[in-house]
Image (cartoon, helix red, strand yellow):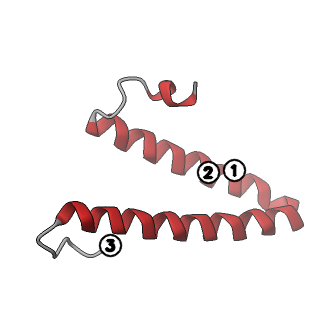
Amino acid sequence: MPPLTTGSPSQEILLNSLLTIDELTTGLTVLACDAAANPQQSPRLRALLDELLAALHACENELGIYSDPESCSE
């Protein structure tokens, strides 16, 4: 991801977040469709999903967003 370049980093972060969400949604949908057609791919996809959630929770913890990573699953 390129460094922030505008005078309004918060807007650029929001735009980057939305673009990343779009790419993740598309990529995960393609992988899920492939795993549905090829069940042997399912364990790798599940591992990827676990890794993505772990990275998200780690970042939230580092930034102090949630005091308890389990609180967002309730």
Q: Which mark is residue 1?
A: 3
Q: Earlier in the sequence, mark 3 or mark 1?
A: 3
Task: Look at the picture and state if 41 lies above or below 52.
Answer: below
Q: Is residue 6 left or right of residue 57?
A: left
Residue at image point 25% right, 65% down: 11
Distance between the Cα atoms at labels 2 and 1?
Answer: 5 Å
Please, which residue is most extreme toward the left here? 7
Q: Secondary structure at mark 2?
A: helix
Image coords of residue 5 (percent x, y) = 16, 76
Instruction: Give the label, 3 or 1, closer to the camera.
Output: 3
The foreground one among 44 and 9 is 9
Q: Is residue 41 left or right of residue 24?
A: right
Residue on which disc 2 sits: 49
Q: Amino acid at mark 3?
A: Met
Distance between the Cα atoms at labels 3 and 1?
Answer: 25 Å
Q: Amino acid at mark 2?
A: Leu
Q: Is residue 39 left or right of residue 18?
A: right
| Dot 2 and dot 1 residues touching (CB under 8 Å) | yes
Q: Residues within 10 Å of mark 2 (few under 14, many from 20)?
A: few
Q: Amino acid at mark 1?
A: Arg
The foreground one among 47 and 69 is 69
Residue at image point 60% right, 64% down: 25
Residue on which disc 1 sits: 46
Q: Earlier in the sequence, mark 3 or mark 2?
A: 3
Q: Secondary structure at mark 3?
A: loop
Residue at image point 75% right, 52% down: 43
Distance between the Cα atoms at labels 3 and 2?
Answer: 21 Å
